[in-house]
Image (cartoon, helix red, strand yellow):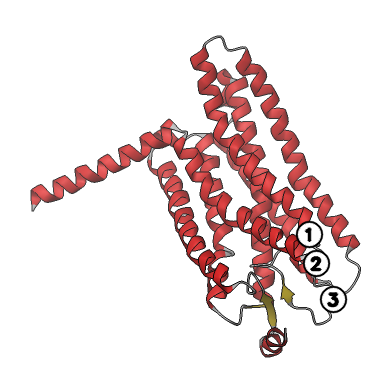
Amino acid sequence: MRRFNNTFHHFNGFVLVGFSEWPRLEMVLFVVICIFYILTLFGNSTIIILSHLDPRLHTPMYFFLANLSFLDLCYTTSTVPQMLVNIQSHKRNISYIGCVAQLFIFLGLGSTECVLLSVMAFDRYVAICQPLQYTVIMHSWLCQQLAAVAWVTGFSNSLVQTVLTFLLPRCGQYRVENFFCEVPAMLQLSCVDTRINEVEMYAAVVVIKVIPVGLILFSYINIVRAVVRIQSSEGRKKAFNTCGSHLLVVIMFYGSAISGYAYMAPKSNSAKLKGKLLALFYGLLTPMLNPLIYTLRNKDVKGAVKKLLGREQEQGGTCLRRM
């Protein structure tokens, strides 16, 4: 404890505790986090590149998927590099400005993903329930507007919560019980009553998470009704496969994010441990799995990958023949 206090006195910022009490566990986590981060960068970058290069993927669905992949790249990069540096360091410091920026960006991207997933559900609703009018309704200008609404809503929520969180006095408490700066962990540092902030945070959860979940449920209820009316079993299978990937991503993301609020003010060491593990799940594992879920279940993406690899092999063969 004295070492952390002295560190802060010398370094005007915060101490990100992480799993510092279990150094062996942290070394295992360092390797695992590195692997997951590399896979996240590779998977999401691949989807962005394919969506740009392959004309078959120039559709609203892949426009939103490319947005989601870009978002996940930024989401993990806002925390993971700092996390890896801290695991290898004894200081585990982050500056005050760095903590503010990290919380603002991480929360803004997470909030944006909540809204974007509901937009993607609406896209699937129109594609299955209004197939003949799909191209008319989901035109490029509307897609850009919906994506812009998701980004603006997410970062507006983050701005409000970041300002309210850092206005709270901390009275010398600067040990953040997590790997990165986030609202629940920062509220624990306050030496005043945080009920107003907690009410505001839960109100934001309703707006950013519960309302989009309601829109997603509404979309999928109508999708199921439309699919049931399809007479062809092949048609029903194709429709469910189209929506299955998105639905799985929704369950993982919302499940882990909403569960995280259960550990907002942990009273015991076990609750703190669960909160940290949950933060790792929604901060790293979900963004890594998103591109895998979409590519493994999607014929268009797999076809685009084969086409791209085939083009590279042809170019490589041409170069060899010229040599």
Q: Which residue is mark 2?
A: 187
> Which residue is at a point 37% across and 37% down the rendered structure image?
304
Residue drawn at point x = 68 percent, y = 65 percent: 103
- Please, what secondary structure does the residue beneath circle 2 have? helix
- Going by the numbered disc 2, the residue's amino acid type is Leu
Q: Residue at x 61, y 78 (%)?
A: 92
Relative placement, left or right, of 153 versus 301 is right
In the image: residue 149, left or right of residue 290? right
Q: Circles 2 and 1: CB distance less than 8 Å?
A: yes
Above or below for 174 versus 147? below
Cβ–Cβ below 8 Å for labels 3 and 2?
no
Residue 251 visible in rendering: yes
Numbered disc in front, either 2 or 1? 1
Q: Which residue is mark 3?
A: 169
Tell me which numbered mark, 1 or 3, is placed earlier along the sequence.
3
Residue 37, horizontal then vertical, whole percent: 49, 59
Q: Earlier in the sequence, mark 2 or mark 1?
A: 2
- Residue under numbered circle 1: 264
Give the image location of residue 256, x and y in percent.
67, 49
Estimate the x, y position of residue 14 in percent, counting from the top left: 69, 78
Foreground of the two, 42 or 270: 270
Q: CA distance from mark 3 to mark 2?
A: 10 Å
Between the C-alphas of marks 1 and 3, the distance is: 18 Å
Question: Does 14 sit above or below residue 204?
Answer: below
- Please state if 317 lies on the left or on the right of 96 as rendered: left
Task: Look at 50% across and 61% down and name the residue there.
Answer: 32
Nearer mark to the viewer, of 1 and 3: 1
